[in-house]
Amino acid sequence: MGSMGNAVEKGVEQDDLVMPLIDFGAFLHGDSTVKKAVAEQIANAFKSSGFLYLENHDIPQKQVSLAFSESAQFFERSQTQKNELQWTTPDSNRGYVAWGREKVTQSADPEEIARLRASNPDLKESMEIGREGVPGLPNQWPSRFDEEGKTFETDMQHFFLTLKDLHIQVMRAIALGMGMDESFFDSYTSAGDNTLRLLHYPSVKKSLWRKNPSQVRAGEHSDYGSITLLFQDDIGGLEVKSPKGTWVRARPIPGTIVVNAGDLLQRWSNDIIKSTKHRVIQPPPKETEQDEDEDAMVPARYSIAYFCNPNFDRFIEALPGTWEDSGKKYEGINSGDYLVMRLAATY
Ligand SMILES: O=C(O)CCC(=O)C(=O)O
Ligand SMILES: [Fe+2]
């Protein structure tokens, strides 16, 4: 398809990994023919690389910039304050996560995870925000400290709901693109059992990587849920694993959102959709860079990930059209149980 070739050209293509740049405006506002064509582009990207870039997604740049600046302000708070807001349990999955606490990994072996955590902690801190109003699982808002914290709470709640809507729309596109009824996922996306994660990768010495070449900002992993909506700043460092086993840079493209499939969507689709491994390393070197300087620093990087999940009370079984010929590869599983199981193995 002509427009698909164009999408690939403007996205990223390397080592058999294709992350197309897709004009989501054409899905949101186009007529039914255009809509269907875009939905198919999206479904195809999910089936091949599991990664794509969305442009014209209707989220105002102002709102995104505000979220980034308030995120940066949040991480500037004292460690004491941040620790008061700390993440407690997988069931809650809300609050502040300090450096080295989480080691995202595919391993489910607690001893191995403990070893990894001790040797190569991720160089990052994060703030996890869940759905508001869940009894017994309050978000950890800095509104308890000051006015700035109150503004943070209001704006992040708003951003959460904006992204909840985009999740609904992207799932509609996937449904349509896979030949299902466009509204198929609506009863799975209505609750918004999602997590908004603000990420800060602090500025660190470049020499860290000379001393330990396997140091990472975020270790190799796949995401757990249905899809992830990821905003990155202009620093770079996100990499996606190609079918050849090489790492391909998912360079920042201004104004776009990186969208990728998670493990539960792969399972739900009987492995037709791909949940692809990715990681964050140091940004690409600038041409003018002097590498010899012992004190040279890698700049801080900020990103915002919105992890989407099917409503936690829904049962997830192979999607229609994905198993009739080959059989079901997986048992059905409750969405909320699946996520808590994965989080419990990680923290
Ligand atoms: O910071 C990024 O660009 C990616 C973060 C990520 O993959 C994650 O938190 O799951
Ligand atoms: Fe991720």
Image: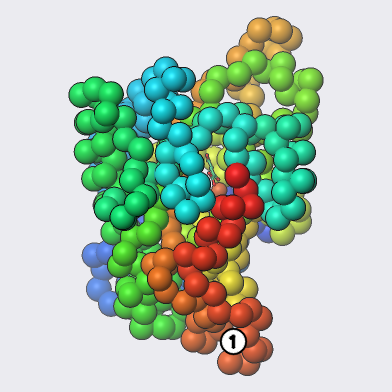
Residue 17 lies, in percent from the top left, at 64, 56
Q: Is residue 57 visible?
A: no
As drawn, 12 above or below 72: below
Would residue 317 appear left or right of 152 to someone viewing this image?
right
Residue nearest the observer in this picture, 177 or 20 = 177
View extreme (bottom): residue: 325
Q: Within 8 Å: ligand 2 and the Cβ of disc 1? A: no
Residue nearest the observer in this picture, 167 or 283 = 167
Would residue 183 appear left or right of 94 to someone viewing this image?
left
Q: Residue at x 28, y 24 (%)?
A: 145
- Which quarter of the figure is the C terminus placed in? top right
Residue 83 lies, in percent from the top left, at 46, 27
Residue 259 lies, in percent from the top left, at 47, 54
SS at badge 1: loop
Q: Residue at x 37, y 30 (%)?
A: 71
As drawn, 278 above or below 71: below
Q: Is residue 135 visible?
A: yes
Q: Amino acid at mark 1?
A: Trp
Q: Please, which colouring scheme is shown? A: rainbow
As drawn, 331 above or below 6: below
Q: Which residue is mark 1?
A: 323
Residue nearest the observer in this picture, 340 or 257 = 340
Q: Residue at x 46, y 77 (%)?
A: 315
Tell me where residue 139 sits by quadrant.
top left
Q: Residue at x 72, y 40 (%)?
A: 114
Q: Residues within 10 Å of mark 1 (few under 14, many from 20)?
A: some
Residue 157 lies, in percent from the top left, at 26, 44
Would residue 199 appear left or right of 186 to someone viewing this image?
right
